[in-house]
Image: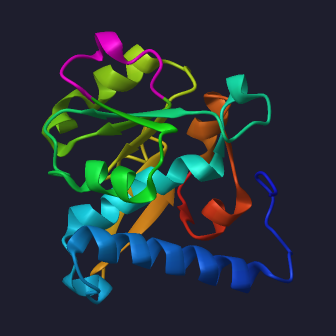
Amino acid sequence: MRWLKPSKHRDKPKLLSAAFSLFCAAIAMVSGSAFPANDLPEYSVKAAFLLNIPDFVLWPEAGGNRRQSKRICVYGDNPFENYLQQLIETKSDDSIELTYLETLTNVVGCHLLFISQSEKNSVDNIIKILGNDPILTVSDIGEFARKQGMIEFNVRDNKIRMLINLNNTANAQLKLDSNLIELSTIVN
């Protein structure tokens, strides 16, 4: 995989199609049947994105090894219900540790921090506490990526899109795979 450079790989459409197929299969398993994407609960789709994003990120302590275990943390009210846990069980993936945080005192060790809508008035303080630690911040709070966050889930035309701030990810020494970048809107 290429990092931070657009991929010119000839098989990219095949790879993206295969990845999308796996993603749809995971969603269908969680929902109990195969529904069109626009019939799925919003947070089941966001949960699938959240669990797959670490596959496209290289953390500085990983030393090139993307297969190490990842700790995904949710801070604030849990909007995902049980979708995250169901997807982890469906993937039979013991490399993902899911943690729900009530305070930021346990944020050390989180690779990805999802900041819930319930914390929209605290985002500035949360980002200040994190500093430039290599923690990928993700949220669906409006303007999150344009301001201080890294990845924002944005709903437009009944589709969930990712907005990415590459400056903020670079400041935290995180490298994003070009496939993730190409599927997103850059908002530096």
Quarter of the rendering containing residue 32: bottom left
Query: Colour scheme in the image?
Result: rainbow
User: In the image, which residues are magenta?
Assistant: 100-110
**Up-down relation of residue 153 to residue 126 (above or below):** below
The answer to whether residue 109 is magenta is yes
Q: x%, y% of residue 120?
A: 20, 38
Q: How many marks?
A: 0
Q: x%, y% of residue 28?
A: 32, 77
Q: Depth check: 139 or 42 in front?
A: 42
- Residue 115 visible within the image: yes
The answer to whether residue 120 is magenta is no
**Up-down relation of residue 179 to residue 144 (above or below):** below
Q: Residue at x 70, y 54 (%)?
A: 177
**Up-down relation of residue 177 to residue 107 (above or below):** below
Q: Is residue 93 left or right of residue 106?
A: right
Q: Quadrant of the N terminus?
A: bottom right
Q: x%, y% of residue 119?
A: 18, 34
Q: Residue at x 42, y 77 (%)?
A: 25
Q: Residue at x 42, y 78 (%)?
A: 24
The single residue placed furthest to the front in the displayed view is 92
Q: Is residue 129 left or right of residue 105?
A: right
Q: Residue at x 18, y 71 (%)?
A: 41
The single residue placed furthest to the bottom in the displayed view is 36
Quarter of the rendering containing residue 6: bottom right
- Residue 141 visible within the image: no
